[in-house]
Image (cartoon, helix red, strand yellow):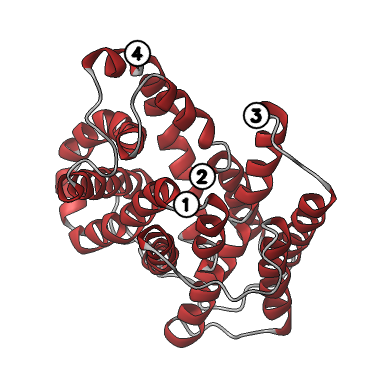
Amino acid sequence: MSNRMYQASLTLMIGGAFWGLLWIPLRAIAGFGVEGAWSTLVIYGAPAFLLVPLSIYRWRIISAQLGTFLAVGLFCGVSFSLYGIAILLTEVNRVILLFYLTPLWGTLIGVFFLAERLTVRRVLALGLGLVGLLVVLDLGIKIPWPRNVGDWMAFIAGITWAMGSAVLFRSGGVKAIDQASSFVIGGSTCTVILLLLAGGTLGSVPEPQALVRSIPTGIIMALIIPPVLMMTIWPVTLLPPGRAGILLMTEVIFGLGSAWWLANEVLGMREMIGAALILCATVLEVTTSNQVKAPPEPTVKG
């Protein structure tokens, strides 16, 4: 594997770690009285105030690759919107498991649509990661299958993220900052649509005072989310969807560790064994040579 691929792999693992800390600002915003899907809207809406004007300024460049721009917003933005809302509707452990079936979907997409070879190392990494999830979430050997609306949202979120990863992998020509803008716009739009359709079941409209109290956190998110998105998106443009899904599982490890450290949640032997299995999967995937055709060279400059 080239140095660039190693850099992309390590960057994605770090990006996944940041996503594992996302519960901290979500809880903070909810503590101010902005609850339910509205807190998700704040997370995506705040950086949109910076990225939407940038997209307008760069519209001539974006319009040359408008199809990819819209596809990223549709698949990736919708994925993380559904993931955030699913946490409100079902058990968190089921959301994590159903979403992180994404390495499986990514591997299937890579094999059937991106000419990726299914190697023994990939199968082993995939198995270690999924078994690690089952151990962490204490689900034994049960087959994960959606049981309610929240479960289905998490399940669909994993599939759409894998599809979005494939789009990103083949998106030569679209700058990462423009893809981040599409991500934020897509996530915000999806959340607004779901809030309108749900009619209050995803959270009541927050009081003006609550929104004012959430402004400082929103400003911080506006500054943090774009670079974290860049750390997620740039590597995915270079890595096959299956590999990207496995490496992004560092989110689970850092989510567990941060919740234990900051929220006094349980981190016992079972959680540590599961985290170790996931870590082994990511290390195995990082050290695997690239087995897929490289994405096309960029054609649009900006």
Q: What x and y, as percent, mark residue 31?
A: 44, 22
Q: Which element carries disc 1, helix, strand or loop?
A: helix
Between the residue at mark 1 and the residue at mark 4, the CA separation in whole angstroms equals 33 Å
The type of residue carrying mark 3 is: Ala
Q: What x and y, as percent, mark residue 120?
A: 72, 84
- Residue 213 — which label? 4
The residue lying at 35 percent from left, 31 percent from top is: 35
Q: Earlier in the sequence, mark 3 or mark 4?
A: 4
The residue carrying pointer 2 sits among few (fewer than 14), some (14 to 19) or many (20 or more) residues within 10 Å by Cα, namely many
- Residue 231 — which label? 2
The answer to the question of whether label 1 and label 2 lie on touching residues, with beta carbons closer than 8 A, is: yes
Q: Quadrant of residue 211?
A: top left
Q: Earlier in the sequence, mark 3 or mark 2?
A: 2
Between the residue at mark 4 and the residue at mark 2, the CA separation in whole angstroms equals 29 Å
The answer to the question of whether label 1 and label 3 lie on touching residues, with beta carbons closer than 8 A, is: no
The type of residue carrying mark 2 is: Met
Q: Nearer the viewer, mark 4 or mark 2?
A: 4
Q: Which element carries disc 2, helix, strand or loop?
A: helix
Q: Earlier in the sequence, mark 1 or mark 4?
A: 4
Q: Is residue 208 among what the camera can see?
A: yes
Q: Earlier in the sequence, mark 4 or mark 2?
A: 4
In this figure, which residue is indicated by the disc labeled 3?
A: 263
Between the residue at mark 3 and the residue at mark 4, the CA separation in whole angstroms equals 22 Å
180 or 289, nearer to the observer: 180
The residue carrying pointer 3 sits among few (fewer than 14), some (14 to 19) or many (20 or more) residues within 10 Å by Cα, namely few
The residue lying at 49 percent from left, 49 percent from top is: 232
Q: Does 232 sit above or below residue 49?
A: below
- Residue 234 — which label? 1
